[in-house]
Image (spheres, rainbow, N blue to C red):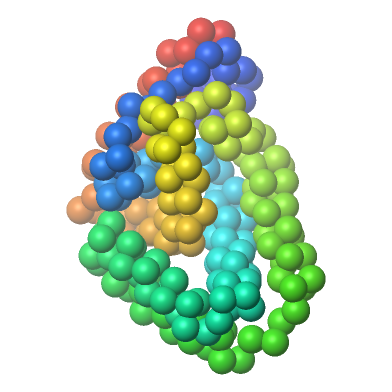
Amino acid sequence: MADYMVKRKLKAVTKDINFGYEFSHFLNFPQQLASRWEDHQTIGNCLCHILAAPVQGAAGLALIHLYAGYYTALVCSLILSAWCIANDRKYGTIYSVYSISTTLLQLTFLSQIDLDTLLCTIALTVFIQLGIGHGLFERRLPNETEGIHKGDGKLFAAVDIANEVILATFHFYSLAMVRLGYRPDIYPEVRQELNRIQNLLADQDP
């Protein structure tokens, strides 16, 4: 793993690399966790995302509440929960309880936050994840900025961005549990997929 990390940091991507995912990727939880793991190797970067992603999500939901109303924000939270459960029933259910509970608390007690505060909060969380997480700890930007793609087509790319942003908290909490050994049922599949995409990246021309 250490040799791979050094190689990734010193090696610039000179051509497009495609992981070969199809739209089934968006309901393939091990693939999603493996691609996240490859892009977030260091503990520091993972911690930045674990801490900042929930705040970013809450601020985004507050924006929806601000402009579209209470019930629209609540419906968005329910859709998010359903998406998480569709990906993984065990962690999806646990995360849904957390997500819906915090959403109700947020919409009840934090509904008076103004637009400027929300935008500053989102900007700060983006800086923590990209500037500190990827810049300071990972020493490289996310794969998509280096010419690396998960699948073909603009529609796939758009859905992938939505998937990564909307499910960020769910992904990083779940990935932490997998890396700590709490999901032996999916760890082998995640690890196998991680090895496959790392081999793709390691085989690129220097």
> x%, y% of residue 151?
38, 31
Residue visible at 43% across and 13% down? Answer: 203
> x%, y% of residue 80?
39, 67
> x%, y% of residue 139?
66, 35
- Quarter in which the C terminus is drawn: top right
Residue visible at 50% across and 45% down? Answer: 161
Relative to 42, is 168 above or below?
below
The residue lying furthest to the top in this view is 205
> x%, y% of residue 18?
41, 24
For the question of whether residue 98 can be seen, the reply is no
The residue lying furthest to the bottom in this view is 108
The residue lying furthest to the left in this view is 185
Residue visible at 54% across and 33% down? Answer: 144
- Image quadrant of residue 54? bottom right
The answer to whether residue 184 is left or right of residue 147 is left
Relative to 114, is 150 above or below?
above
For the question of whether residue 59 can be seen, the reply is yes
The answer to whether residue 10 is left or right of residue 78 is right
Q: Nearer the viewer, residue 74 or 48?
A: 74
